[in-house]
Image (spheres, rainbow, N blue to C red):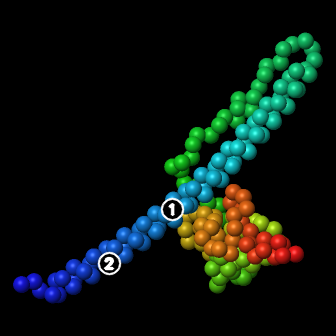
Amino acid sequence: MLDPNVITALQTHIRESRGKQNRLISRLRDLENEADLVREEIAELENNAEQMTSTIDTLLAMMSSGSRGGKAAKRTTVEDEFPRLPELRETKPQSSNNIEPHSHRFADRTITQACTLLLRESGVPLHVNELYNLLVAGGMEFKGNNPTISVAVSLNRNRRFRKVGPGTFDLVMREASQAAS
């Protein structure tokens, strides 16, 4: 006959294993969301770089076609001087935390509480980098390797905020109050 204590111990072990499994699945989802945010920012930067490259190439072409002296000027492009960077999928972004806190205003607040105050005070949507700099200046401390992503994930998950652009957030209440007026 089986000992009831053995069955109880096995059931407890199964519950603990399932709980750990659920926590790991949740953590994996968080990391995937963070990776998606970083990919969006990289794509935005690449798009901006391509637009600037095109504009500079056009200006260089205009300048070389207007050259005097009868000699054909060598056509240069931006890519000659600034080659495209390789994909950065596996590299960890460098964190520059050189901001000194000016106060301890946010030391005892959560990210979402502090960001709510900052967005109310600013009156306009803010990018996560701006929010991060203001949070650190207000005395908030971050323990993770990617604090700006932590800010973005926190705001993405909270219904008080809405994403208005890549990495840029605003208060939902501001939209509602503007629609009412």
Position of 159 relative to 38 (above/below): below
Q: Position of residue 99 (x, y in %)?
A: 70, 68
Disc 1 marks which residue? 31
Inspect the image, locate mark 2, and give the three-letter code of the amino acid beneath it: Glu
178 on left or right of 49: right
Please identify the quadrant where the N terminus is shown: bottom left
Badge 1 marks a residue whose secondary structure is: helix
Q: Is residue 59 visible?
A: yes
Position of 43 relative to 121 (above/below): above
Q: Quadrant of residue 147?
A: bottom right
What residue is rendered at 88% in x and 26% in y? 63
Q: Which label was assigned to residue 16?
A: 2
What residue is rendered at 77% in x and 40% in y? 52
Please identify the quadrant where the C terminus is shown: bottom right
> How crowded is the residue under tag 2: few (<14 C-alpha within 10 Å), some, or many (20+)?
few
What residue is rendered at 68% in x and 60% in y? 167
Q: Position of residue 151 (x, y in %)?
A: 63, 68
Q: Quadrant of residue 18?
A: bottom left
Q: Which label was assigned to residue 12?
A: none
